[in-house]
Image (cartoon, rainbow, N blue to C red):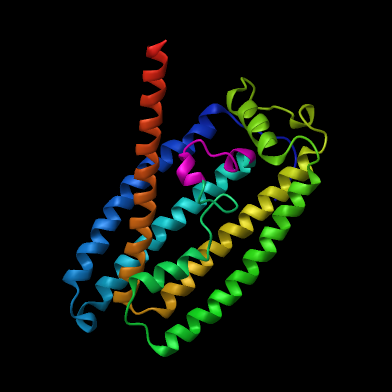
Amino acid sequence: MPGGSYRSSSHDDNSFEVFLEGWLIRQEQFLNELVVAQDTFDDQESQENDMRDLISRVLAHYQEYYEEKSRMTYRNVFRAFSPTWFSPLERSFLWITGFNPGLIFNLVTDSVNNLSEHQVQRLNWLKHETKAEERSLTEEMAQIQESVASPPLADLARRVGMQLIYTDSINTEIEEVDGNIDQLKTALENVVTDADRLRTRTAERVVDLLDPLQSLKFLSAVGQLQLRVRMMGMEKEAERQQQRNEHSNGW
């Protein structure tokens, strides 16, 4: 991705949070459809088209997320590494600004109990290939972090990202913050793009090797995990806020 100065505004950055709120509402609606469909589509041969239509719509829903995330990353890649729209619990699961692709294979084996021997072999081969790509991207990310002598990458992300969020100018020159920021920005954009591509490609390839009903079960497991972690994270944050309020009132 190209370097150069950022052109960002608080409206642009906050737009991803607004998008995510709506996206998660639709995610819950799709999850309900997936759960109901597993009981409704009991005759795979006669209802295969209906199942495939639902699967395509769910995958398009995820594609919409990654397209919007890509736009946000280009506007402010540092904020992607310090996402205020996720709770600390959700952020603890992140690998290069998103879920670890290897998690997909755990979800498949936990949710689908009728995999054929051929499917298991293909999944194992895909898992091995995915792990190799994960290691390569992890090493690339480590090299980027090592190149940032001071401040550490996370601190730089917060410092630069928050400056961009609250600036009144939509044409802020990042060179004023760090002379090497263009190279860092480009490197981070590239590694995020590659990580997101690995995530989406792995999920799509897993769906391709499953039959329609198995895909419904797999996609249900993905949605359930995501929404469950988000709910737990929000509950923990609400508890922390209540404790802080009680402590403040105690003084």
Residue 221: where, in percent of width, then height?
Answer: 34, 63
Could you tell whether 118 is left or right of 160 in the image? left
Please tell me which residue lies in front, 25 or 243: 243
Could you tell whether 98 is left or right of 28 in the image? right
Could you tell whether 149 is left or right of 89 in the image? right
Quadrant (top left, top right, bottom left, bottom right) of the C terminus:
top left
Could you tell whether 222 is left or right of 122 in the image? left
Residue 178: where, in percent of width, then height?
Answer: 79, 32
Q: Tell me which residue sits at (48%, 64%) in the image.
A: 103
Q: Tell me which residue sits at (38%, 19%) in the image.
A: 245
Q: Which residues are magenta?
A: 78-91
Q: Residue furthest top?
A: 251
- Is residue 149 positioned above or below 132 on the image? above
Residue 47 painted magenta: no
Residue 213: where, in percent of width, then height?
Answer: 29, 75
Please tell me which residue lies in front, 171 or 106: 106
Q: Tell me which residue sits at (45%, 74%) in the image.
A: 206
Q: Quadrant of residue 138?
A: bottom right
Residue 87 painted magenta: yes
Residue 82: where, in percent of width, then height?
Answer: 58, 39
Q: Tell me which residue sits at (67%, 29%) in the image.
A: 159
- Is residue 88 positioned above or below 175 on the image? below
- Is residue 148 positioned above or below 159 on the image? below
- Is residue 15 positioned above or below 90 on the image? above
Please tell me which residue lies in front, 201 or 8: 201
